[in-house]
Image: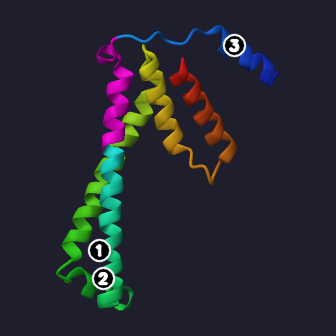
Amino acid sequence: MPRKSPRQTIEIYESAPLPKSGNTNADKAVSACSEWFARHNEQEVLAKRWQRLETHLIRQHRWFQLSSQERAVHPEAPDLEAISDQLDELYLLNLKLLISLPSIAATTGHGLASKLSVALVLIHPEENKEVHTLIQSVLMDVKAN
């Protein structure tokens, strides 16, 4: 199957008009991405709580030297489990939303920028610097127009 050259791919996207700015309340992509980011931010807060608690347990209670049975009955174990459960729940909800995001059409520039912002967060710069930089550049271009 013949591949398209990068130039042909660019021409296809250049011919597609960018969404016009308008009422972002009607743009389902904006609300979906806002929901995704709210959960993502909550995950970051919870992960930091987990990290602080685990660091405390490692330093003060030699956490990794305790048996699994000793860890299970430790007074702070329920906190770790609750955080873990919340993180799992948020992850699954955001994964479900992320899977549906390609089918949610951005109808405004804000919606398009929102979807690109989600992609930018998911492409870690240390794992794929070129793609991260490209998405960042496209996002700046969209926001400038």
Mark 1 to mark 2: distance in Å?
6 Å
- Using the image, determine if residue 119 lies above or below residue 69: above
> Disc 3 residue type?
Ile
Circle 2 sits in a helix, a strand or a loop, which is it? helix
Q: Split into 4 quadrants, where in the image is the C terminus? A: top right
User: What residue is pinned by disc 2?
Assistant: 57
Label disc, if present, on residue 53 of the rendered structure:
1
Identify the magenta region.
Answer: 23-38
* Location of residue 136 (image quadrant): top right
- Using the image, determine if residue 79 lies above or below residue 13: below
- Using the image, determine if residue 137 lies above or below residue 112: below
> Disc 2 residue type?
Leu
Mark 2 to mark 3: distance in Å?
55 Å
How many circles with numbers are drawn on the protein?
A: 3
State yes or no: discs 1 and 2 in contact (Cβ < 8 Å).
yes
Circle 3 sits in a helix, a strand or a loop, which is it? helix
* Location of residue 72 (image quadrant): bottom left
**How many C-alpha atoms fall within 10 Å of the one at disc 2: few (<14), some, or many (≥20)?**
some
State yes or no: discs 2 and 3 in contact (Cβ < 8 Å).
no
Specify whether 23 is left or right of 108.
Answer: left
**Which residue appears at 26% of the width and 59% of the height?**
85
Relative image position of residue 71 (x, y in whole percent): 27, 83
Relative image position of residue 24 (x, y in whole percent): 34, 17
> Disc 1 residue type?
Leu
Label disc, if present, on residue 12 of the rendered structure:
3
